[in-house]
Amino acid sequence: MSALMEARDLAVHFRAHRAVARAVDGVSFEWQPGEILGVVGESGCGKSTLARALLGLVPPTTGSVARDGAAVEGKAALRDLRRRVQMIFQDPYQTLNPRQRVATIVAEPLRVQGVNGADHEARVRRAMEDVGLEPERFLDRYPHQLSGGQRQRVAIAAALVLEPEGLICDEPVSMLDVSVRAQILQVLIELRQRRNLALLFITHDLSLAWSLCDRLAVMYLGRIVEQGSAVDVIEHPQHPYTQALVAAVPVPTAGARIREPLSGELPDSTNVPSGCRFHPRCPRRFEPCDRVDPPLLATTGPGQLAACLLHDPALAPDAVA
Amino acid sequence: MSALLEIRDLHVNHGDRPIVDGVDLTLEPGEALGLAGESGCGKTTTALALMKLLPASFNQSGTMTLRPPGVEEPINVERRTEAGMQVVRWRHVSLVFQGAMNSLDPVKRVDHQLAEAITLHERAASAGDVRARIGELLTTVGLTPGLGRSYPHQLSGGQRQRVMIALALACRPSLVIADEPTTALDVVMQAQILELLERLREQLGLALILISHDLGVLAETCDRIAVMYAGRIVETGPVREVFDAPQHPYTKRLLDSLPVIGGSRVLAPPIPGGPPDPSDLPQGCRFRPRCPYAAEVCLQDPPLREVRPAQAAACHFAPWDEWPPVTEAAVEGAAG
């Protein structure tokens, strides 16, 4: 079985004044059909740029994107890809045209993709039902007549109307209230169960990623620094950065204390440190970390990879490995 | 010892819409109180009412009494005029609000902005004193004094939020209200800011009202928590008790619908629907239309009453010793 989508050594660099921002800097991964793949990391780590590059919304500097094992090249392939893989964004207030009714918004992708007009109504209704909005009550409304959660449901319905195989979700619930957030997550989980819809879930919320995703990729400064099953990566993180991220998550358990938060801040992507890009902030760095850029290495966790020299048997000091 | 802050029967109306509807709060010196709830529940309005910063279209009533240490006469905030409030704001109570880091003046250096805040209330301060105080404030919030020479755009989001906290501390208040101070920040920076707030409480004996929709943030930082829903406090108590044994169905279901690392990955069914519109509140308990346990009696307004030691809930059925399993709750107007 070939991957639904695949990134091969993908890089996206932007020119910023006289510097070059390496937003995505050599990322390879596979996203399988029906899989919920989480991409986690801090703001500025490149996770949103990565999502846009997958759909060709920003051109890759180097590397390529493949769907069903074939590289996506040329306009026709891109058009076909965007029909099979859709995207929703963080802010449903900005992505819905305020002057269009819900019925028009949800049908828009059908028109863009040139789907036979006779099918539109039935497909729009089905998409609305899939996201838990009764067509009779909502199709004639304008976005300002909807709550935040309802707007995000409309955005999901518009993404679903083409019956895609994959949905890229860029922080889809981070602007919503807690109770509404849980409702939207339930909609997404049900879509995966009913339609085998694969989700690429971009989030900075590690608790959410842990409960929702099958697999996780942790990004730092444009690179994947750790990947593996969501449960393993969060419960037994192998990269010092993932360990620090997990330790920083506030938990609603009384008496929980913050354990030594990571010092410093994410460096600027125009100024990526030498060697391991995490080494200036790493509490466990050792001698060659400032010179050797570690690839993703096998760890003790099955299928769990970490880009950290602690997992290089030839270099790691025994005491810390 | 008398309370630092006592709010009694606070009501805030916007036209005929009750935004805050009978809130009582007490805060001891040095205590950290968490105010939890979703957008529109009235938590920010409560804070702004206390600072008397609400626009003229809002009407507020109720008493708010401040007893800052070293001040003999209690301050009756509700009776203060705008001129009178200017002496209270920042000097006794200061506010760090959401996205505040974007409200620094972009064309003034950080030290200049801090100097303005200091001299506002200490007009007699000499230039040397002000400079020393700026250095001290920046150090207190974990910044190097040299950063004072920067303009806001030269600082990161986390550094700007620290400058905002330094501004809030400039006049040595005894109470800081922080409204979603970490919402715009990443988890690592959030942990750093929360740690800073905790350290400030220890070092300066500061009392804190922390407003957040993130229950995890409140659990780590606060002593006590008050959960608001549709303008009212529906549950309050020590953080540990409220999280371990919530006594209001809203608190219970909110906690159950949040993933907690190491807990269950399968989440409880979400709370259906959305919070009510203040101009169209349900009869009786305001959570009733979304509550799986609602019954006839819930058409009567439940008072907030002590149901376990130090823990109060506004639910007719509290105390809850065990929670019946929730089947799919049928609610009018499902999608929130």
Image (cartoon, rainbow, N blue to C red):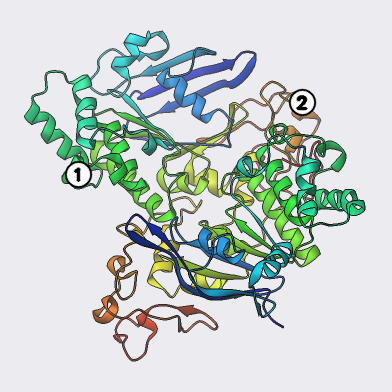
Identify the mark at residue A313; answer none if there is no mark.
none
Residue A24 is situated, as x and y percent measured from the top left of the image, at 46, 66
Q: Please give the label number shown on residue B139.
A: 1
For residue A218, above or below residue B84: below
Q: Which residue is at a point 75% across and 44% down the rendered structure image?
A: A105
Q: Is residue B159 left or right of residue B33?
A: left
Residue A234 in sight here? no
Question: Which circle, 1 or 2, is nearer the viewer?
Answer: 1
**Which mark is drawn over residue B299?**
2
Q: With B186 as the anchor, is A111 left or right in this view?
A: right
Could you say which is closer to the camera, residue B29 or residue B87? Answer: B87
Residue B101 picture location, percent across and down: 37, 38
Q: Amino acid at mark 2?
A: Leu
The local secondary structure at tag 2 comes to: helix
Q: Secondary structure at mark 1?
A: helix
Question: Which one is earlier in the sequence, the residue at label 1 or at label 2?
Answer: 1
> What amino acid does circle 1 point to?
Thr
Crowd rating for badge 2 (residues with CA inside 10 Å; few <14, some 14–19, many 20+): some
For the residues labelled 1 and 2, the Cα–Cα distance comes to: 54 Å
**Image quadrant for the C terminus of chain A?**
bottom left
What is the chain letter for disc 1? Answer: B
